[in-house]
Image (cartoon, rainbow, N blue to C red):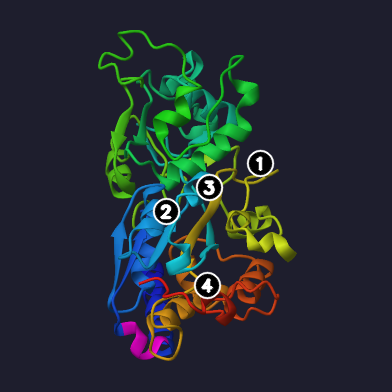
Amino acid sequence: MTNLLVKSAMLSLVMSVFLGAMGSASAQAATVRGSTFPAPLHMDLMPAGWTYSPAVGTSENAAFLTDASVSLAAGESPLTSSILATYTNAPIWGSVIQVPVAAGAVLLPYKENGVTTLNLTTAELCRIFSFSPAARNWNQIATAADDGAAGPASAIQVVYRNEVAGSGTTYLLSRFLNAACGPYLPVNKFFTVSSGFQAMVATALPTLTPTQDANGDGLPDAWVGVQGDAGMSLASSQLHRLGYISPDPAYTSATNDHVARVNGFMPTAPAIQAMLPAPPSGSNRLNPLNWVPGYVIPAGAYPIWGTTNLLLGQCYLGGFGAGTRGASFKSYLSGFSSGGFDLALAAHNLVPLPSTWKTAITDAFLTGSDGNGLALGNAADCSGIAGRP
């Protein structure tokens, strides 16, 4: 209870400072289309008049590129060259900016009788999500010595995100499985990097028998599909379940009696920060695709991690003067790059970016001091452009 009160007080302080900085712009309407992974964070930080509209996976990216009612987008699935190629509004709305605002782990919530300290190895995770005969039941992965109790013969009921458009949380999980599972899968089997769960596992699953897949959906019948992190939280709290979820306390505890260790590790902020590569520099900053860090398998740390990102326009209708919507969006990004939102990130079990990333974002998109002309409202780029509505 004390921790919850402290977190509440920290968020109240952050919000009071932020709203004071936003001034009259905070009362203006804006829609943020976003995934469920960072939803509680943004809904705590957004000023009055802003609306967080839930989306799934890449749909927030597509909406930002095509829908005039979407002011910002938030999610984990990054822009791709094919998605960016659909952006035909640049002559009217201006360039697209993509930046990470926080890092975080994908947690693995579980529930099984007697199992209170679940520890899963990379090999076990690869076998579970590929429906290997070696890891279909709890007694194949849980032992008294490592997991609190020997697992029963019950089937492992994998809980997965089944949104048609995909999920950012699935995307982050897929990066890990794709990079780490090669040695533990049969020849010619692999996990595909995708925000869609079925696309992710289809290339890793064995041929399912009619008994294993009676409904013919291409997935084991023992697995359970849900929508959103809230749906994942509810479903994975039932016996025999193992899922994957945002680290936010709104969805799940971050302790080992609720979520699994991986290779003996729980996620920590310093370890996640250390995994981030250096930010782009020089002319590499001109390509928005270069701003989302690639995945690397960490040594001696929790391995399922990634960033949650923002999409903004470089130019907004009305400009960036005092009291404008553009000024409010610039101030919002500044909250992340200046460290002003760091306490709020910690309260939501997310990790602030390292100082090198914060400086790069400030120099490129807020002050423009890096000379690349990417700053929000940059006169040379926004002159003659109406700006994003």
Task: Let me know if residue 23 is in the magenta part.
Answer: yes
- Element under disc 2: helix
Q: Nearer the viewer, residue 381 or 155?
A: 381
On screen, residue 11 versus residue 124, left or right, reads left
- Residue density around tag 4, few if under 14, some if 14–19, many if 20 or more, within 10 Å: many
Q: Quadrant of residue 60?
A: bottom left
Mark 2 vs mark 1: give the one in front. 2
- First in residue order: circle 1 vs circle 3: 3
Measure the alpha-carbon separation of dots 3 and 2. Answer: 9 Å
Mark 4 vs mark 3: give the one in front. 3
In the rendered image of this protein, does residue 168 appear above or below residue 68?
above
Measure the alpha-carbon separation of dots 4 and 3. Answer: 23 Å
Residue with the mark numbered 3: 80
Residue type marked 2: Asn
Residue type marked 4: Phe
Residue with the mark numbered 2: 61
Quadrant of image for the N terminus? bottom left
- First in residue order: circle 3 vs circle 2: 2
Residue with the mark numbered 4: 336
- Residue density around tag 2, few if under 14, some if 14–19, many if 20 or more, within 10 Å: many
